[in-house]
Amino acid sequence: MPRDYPENLQELERLFPDEASCRNYLLRLRWPAGFVCPECGEKAAWKTNRDLQTCKACGFQASLTAGTIFHGTRKPLALWFRAMWHITNQKYGANAIGLQRILGFGSYHTAWEWLHKLRRAMVRPDRDRLKCYVEVDETFLGAKHRGGKRGRGAPGKIMVAVAVEIEIVDNKPKMGRIRLQRIKDASSQQLLAFVQANVEEGSTIRTDGWEGYNVVASHGFTHDVSRASANVGDDLLPRCHLVVSLLKRWFNGTYQGAVMPGHVDYYLDEFTFRFNRRKSKSRGLLFYRLVQQALIAGPVYGKEIEGGIYSPSRKKATSKRMTIVRELASETTTKTIFSQEV
């Protein structure tokens, strides 16, 4: 199967020199089996002078970018493609100042908003859950507070739940995919909701001795508790702790710790996207995956971003139109598009 993405910047410029080439690329990715009317499911359509697909059955006019990350944009798609290329080719992440300089934006706010929109697209709404053997823990993000309380009850910080899938490669345990999610506290209700949303039922959940995890055993999971206490130097959840260490280093190194609490979810999405694709040898493939997911993530509006804190459900595109489009996609096409997990 020939690759359908650029391998380097020169190929990017050659493949997408103008708006028409970008639109044709998005058209193939959004409707790989041909156009499907979002209103009635009809496949026959004709194109207007404004590049709208008009359904022959019901007359509904569908825009290529409607209902996607590019919804309502006034900037050229070629500029969006270069932004996605820049983001996926930065090993440790991109920041708004760098994107503003690369694309020549007059406004820092535009670059900042684009970054947050594309971070939202980095996680698929219907992604597969972790399975088999999974380590689960929590951590805090935030500055130190003098005189504050240590541990799970520390005030003024953001609690993040961490899940790490363990794969067996050559009879050795290796780190697989991860999941990160902001939670309110370390209560059994919050931890159970995180596990159920991110881990397949029947999997083994390995945690520390915190009592908040005890409830998972009665909800279809096998609960493996590491020792409640450990000797100095023991690491009972090494993979979770490694992910937490890398996450905090990434926050402090790439963004200098300057992340607003209301926007932490966007950065957790980006870190998850990068970590789960850490073994990818092709930057172009990362670009390809981001474009695909930008087409199904749903629109993100500036007011949502500025307000911060969005639902972890990622607005699962429950509208009638999006549902029809997805149901009519062929099984083979779906497997091809989403063969690489996030």
Image: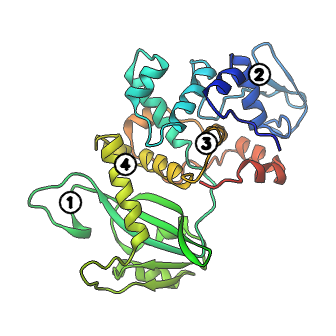
- Residue type at mark 1: give it: Pro
Distance between the Cα atoms at labels 2 and 1? 52 Å
Check disc 1: other Cα within 10 Å, few if <14, some if 14-19, many if 20+: some
Badge 1 element: loop
Which residue lies at the image location 83% right of the left edge and 20% below the top edge? Answer: 47
Q: Which mark is residue 52?
A: 2
Query: Mark 1 or mark 2, which is nearer the start of the sequence?
Result: 2
Evaluate if marks 1 and 4 touch, with contact meaning CB atoms under 8 Å apart: no
Extreme residue toward the front, this view: 170
Residue at left 57%, top 32%? 85
Q: Residue 155 has which mark?
A: 1
Q: Earlier in the sequence, mark 3 or mark 4?
A: 4
As measured in the structure, the alpha-carbon distance from the residue carrying label 4 to the one carrying label 2 is: 42 Å
> Neighbour class for label 3 at 10 Å: few (<14), some, many (≥20)?
many
Residue 261 visible somewhere in the drawing: no
**Circle 2: residue type:** Leu
Question: Of the residues tagged 3 and 2, which is closer to the observer?
Answer: 3
Residue neighbourhood size for the residue with mark 2, other residues' Cα within 10 Å, grouped as few (<14), some (14–19), many (≥20) = some
Q: Amino acid at mark 3?
A: Leu
Nearest the viewer among 234 and 76 is 234
Location of residue 331 by image quarter: bottom right
Q: Disc 3 designates what residue?
A: 286
The x and y percentages for residue 324 are 77, 45
